[in-house]
Image (spheres, rainbow, N blue to C red):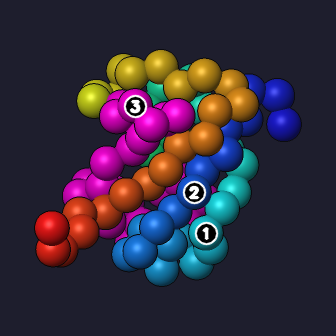
Amino acid sequence: MSGAVTVRYFAAAAEAAGLETEELVAATAGELRAAMTAAHGPGLGRVLTRCSLLAAGTRLADDAAPVAPGVTVDVLPPFAGG
């Protein structure tokens, strides 16, 4: 897929998506969240509101943050503990 990014889901995000890894096409963090919700439904959309997105280890701070083609994006829900 041209412009595809690899998405890795963890914990509650993986459970809501029904898988741990997939490829999606998006140019921004907002587009990526929309693509994830479109692919897996509103249950994942609700989980995503509490998740951080990390692209190559850097937090995508807002929906306008660019997502480079070929990057790996980790979807991380809040974790308990320290």
Segment tinted magenta in the rendering: 36-60
Q: Is residue 38 visible?
A: no
Q: Is residue 63 above or below residue 21?
A: above
Badge 2 density bin: few <14, some 14–19, many ≥20, Cα 10 Å: some
Q: Which residue is mark 1?
A: 20
Examine the structure image and report whether residue 46 is included in the region drawn in magenta. Answer: yes
Q: Residue at x 36, y 21 (%)?
A: 64
Image side of residue 15 versus residue 68, left or right: left
Which quarter of the image is occupied by the N terminus? Answer: top right
For residue 58, the mark is: 3
Which element is circle 3 on? strand
Give the Cα separation between the discs numbered 3 and 1. 20 Å
Point out residue 30 in the picture as x, y percentages from the top left corner: 41, 34
Local SS, label 1: loop
Q: Give the mark, 3 or 1, whose residue is nearer the N terminus.
A: 1
Q: Answer whether labels 1 and 2 touch (C-beta < 8 Å).
A: yes
Q: Considering only vertical position in the picture, is 74 above or below 3?
A: below
Residue 59, quarter of picture: top left
Which amino acid type corresponds to the residue marked 3 in the rendered image? Thr
Tag 2: amino acid: Arg
Q: Name the residue carrying label 2.
A: 8
Task: Determine the image quadrant of residue 53.
Answer: top left
The reply, left or right, for residue 21 in relation to residue 33 is right
Marks 3/2 in contact by CB < 8 Å: the verdict is no
Q: CA distance from mark 1 to mark 2?
A: 6 Å
The answer to whether residue 76 is left or right of residue 15 is left
